[in-house]
Amino acid sequence: MEFDRLRVVLVATRNPLNLGAAARAMGNFGFLHLRVVNPYEIAFREARSAVGAAALLAGAEEYKTVAEAVADCTLVVGTTAVRHRELQHPLRRLDDGARLIRKQLRSSPVALVFGSEKVGLSNRDLSHCHWLLHIPTREEHMSMNLGQAVAVCLYGLVRDVKVRLQPEKTELATAAEVERITAMLLDALQASGYMTPSAAAPTEEKMRRLVRRLNLQARDAEVWLGILRQIVWKLRSS
Amino acid sequence: MEFDRLRVVLVATRNPLNLGAAARAMGNFGFLHLRVVNPYEIAFREARSAVGAAALLAGAEEYKTVAEAVADCTLVVGTTAVRHRELQHPLRRLDDGARLIRKQLRSSPVALVFGSEKVGLSNRDLSHCHWLLHIPTREEHMSMNLGQAVAVCLYGLVRDVKVRLQPEKTELATAAEVERITAMLLDALQASGYMTPSAAAPTEEKMRRLVRRLNLQARDAEVWLGILRQIVWKLRSS
């Protein structure tokens, strides 16, 4: 499975909650390999010992440098919020970048590298990257929470991979069913005095169009017919 | 600007960090209107007073019920991790769903509703939704962290925003109008004996969903309300 080849690399993460959140998002989207580079020791220990910590976090590999953490990868992609700084790297929007990453994952390991909460990736870290991935946030609120950035990037990777979720097939009611409902509605309108029995054809047509605009589903047609039948019966019987 | 029309609705959120994270993601992607329904009071207060809390959070509107929080919206979309439970709603993947939401946002307000961390949205909450949005997570790790789920959904909305869509031509009824019609229908169902006054909540919720599936247009809402009002009046008066 190609996603098995992705390495999520967190560099100098400070907050244990973010380590936990990153691991959780990885679990959600089916990525297994977490690597941490120089995490704040306490954060790493706390995150690992948190109740319900993913096995994934327990199995995280620890490295001293980005170079070691990405050594087995053929493509190294950094992440950044920066937009204006003179970047030495090609910058790709998540949408386009995800396509390239997936392509590469078919044949070999890829590293997706996230910097620390405060300063992101250093120039040194960046120098290990082939290019940078950018989540299109607003100028004024550019910087994302680390855990959320990981979740969004991973979603970007799995987004249009075909999964087996049944597309909802809404079967519409047939014209015959819709017409039966219309007839019953007209009956109710007369019985309730909303419309006189001798109402002009235009009124009837207006009601017919009104019912058509509901785009009734097949499974609901029977229910509506039952409701109207009961209402008409009650109106007529009293 | 169309994104100005999205209302992010958080129901019964427990963790202040999640409230903060949701607000931050909204800021990142340019969404302004946060609504909270019955938040845990302490969580809401804590999140608001946190250092660096977004102005967005301070401006969050508080509601007692989902019905009130979505009253001005023409499309109400719930979010869920559930895949196997017998769902009463159409389920759309974020990818496809985002397209429909954006389309609707061009003309009118849309609510995107998130349930609590523990239990998600209740059946009652869900009965106010037209359909459900689903982030394609893995079977084994389905449930996402709330803050991350909000971030991923909002990213899904802005992702390929360059693509311009045709404005929606048919103006839909607001949730408040649809709820008025639902209430009147329930009244008619009781008056006609279709349903007992003491009918269990599930029946009421079933009817609420039935009415949502009609996708009532704004111009028709008044007509249906008039029809039902007349029927109820007649049923009660005899």
Image: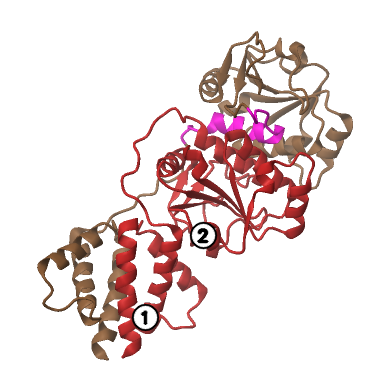
Chain colours: A brown, B red
Q: Circle 1 — which element?
A: loop
Quadrant in which residue B228 is drawn: bottom left
Kind of residue sitting beneath label 1: Tyr
Residue B187 horizontal/vertical position (percent) = 40, 78
Residue B126 circle label: 2
User: Who comes first in sequence, dot 2 or dot 1?
Assistant: 2
Q: Quadrant of the N terminus of chain A?
A: top right
* Residue receiving disc 1: B194
Q: In the rendering, at what x and y percent does residue A61 appear?
A: 78, 26
Of B126 and A235, the residue lying toward us: A235
User: Residue at coordinates 23% horizontally, 68% vertically from top-left?
Assistant: A181
SS for tag 2? helix
Question: Can residue B216 be spotted in the picture?
Answer: yes
B151 on left or right of B50: left
Q: Mark 2–mark 1 contact, CB under 8 Å?
A: no
Q: Is residue A34 magenta?
A: no
Please state if A217 lies on the left or on the right of A85 as rendered.
left
Range drawn in magenta: A140-162
